[in-house]
Amino acid sequence: MKVIVPLAGPDFVITEGHTKAEIIVDGHPILVKALTSRSWSAGVEEYIFVLKDGVEERNFVERALRKWFPLCKLCFMSHPSGGAAFSALIACGLVDDAESPIIIDLADILFDCELTSFEMRLLLKDSSALGLTFESNDSSYSYLAFDDDGKFKEAQEKNVISRYASAGVYVYQNIGCYIRAFSDVLMKPFYKYNDLHYVCPVFNGVCSNGDKVLSVPVRNIVDIKQQL
């Protein structure tokens, strides 16, 4: 199981010498706290981080990231991508197992969840993607909508189309599933937000390809973005 963590957003560097990843929460940097507190973390084989190629980002890698995750892989972008969905796509090129499930974790929301890596793999035998969700009506989140039978209908960024807000973690059977889904969404520009491709709407491509998206509920949300 591989985890892709996009850290190339314009808000990653807070001030000179400080990054969002290093904000201390409960005595730990938020990036470490988020990734190691996931209930499936024991089953993670590899972390792949995507960063913009800049002085502050390079310093962060040497100062902290390589110490926290010494076996991780890194992607550096010379320019901003067209959104986090593109940043995750870049990281897919470093996944060395085409059959391994991938998790795209934005790593800025803390939550409680009991789902283990083994249970995640079992769910992915019947569904092509998993979206971790919690109940909200806050328009700062992305949302997944389901019909009365629990069948996925649509995902939109910053639009309250249901009560199921995304917790910023997206799971796919493998990189091929993600690439196919994103390819479909690229042909539907109305799923962009602020002219960028975010990760959550890629679920629409999973549905268009005839595959299933399952919601996995989480609880006890702590959203770091809202505390900055």
Image (cartoon, rainbow, N blue to C red):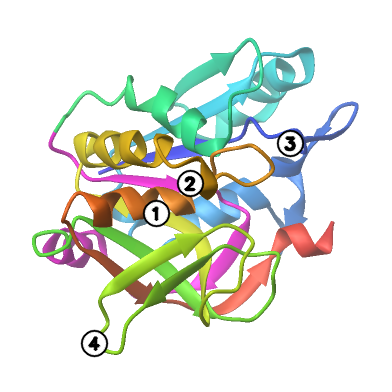
Q: Nearer the viewer, mark 3 or mark 1?
A: 1
**Callout 3, which amino acid?**
Phe
| Quarter containing the N terminus | top left
Q: Which callout, 3 or 1, points at the residue further toward the start of the chain?
A: 3
Q: Which callout, 4 or 3, points at the residue further toward the start of the chain?
A: 3
Alpha carbon distance from label 1 to label 2: 8 Å
Query: Would residue 116 be counted in the magenta stretch?
Result: yes
**Callout 2, which amino acid?**
Val
Q: Are marks 1 and 2 in contact (CB under 8 Å)?
A: yes
- Which of 153/71 is in front? 153
**Callout 1, which amino acid?**
Tyr
Alpha carbon distance from label 4 to label 3: 39 Å
Secondary structure at numbered mark 1: strand
Q: Residue at x 30, y 70 (%)?
A: 152
Secondary structure at numbered mark 4: loop
Whether residue 7 sits left or right of residue 24 in the image: it is left
Query: Would residue 145 be counted in the magenta stretch?
Result: no
From the image, tell me which residue sits under label 1: 170
Q: Which callout, 4 or 1, points at the residue further toward the start of the chain?
A: 4
Residue 149 got which mark?
Answer: 4
From the image, tell me which residue sits under label 3: 12
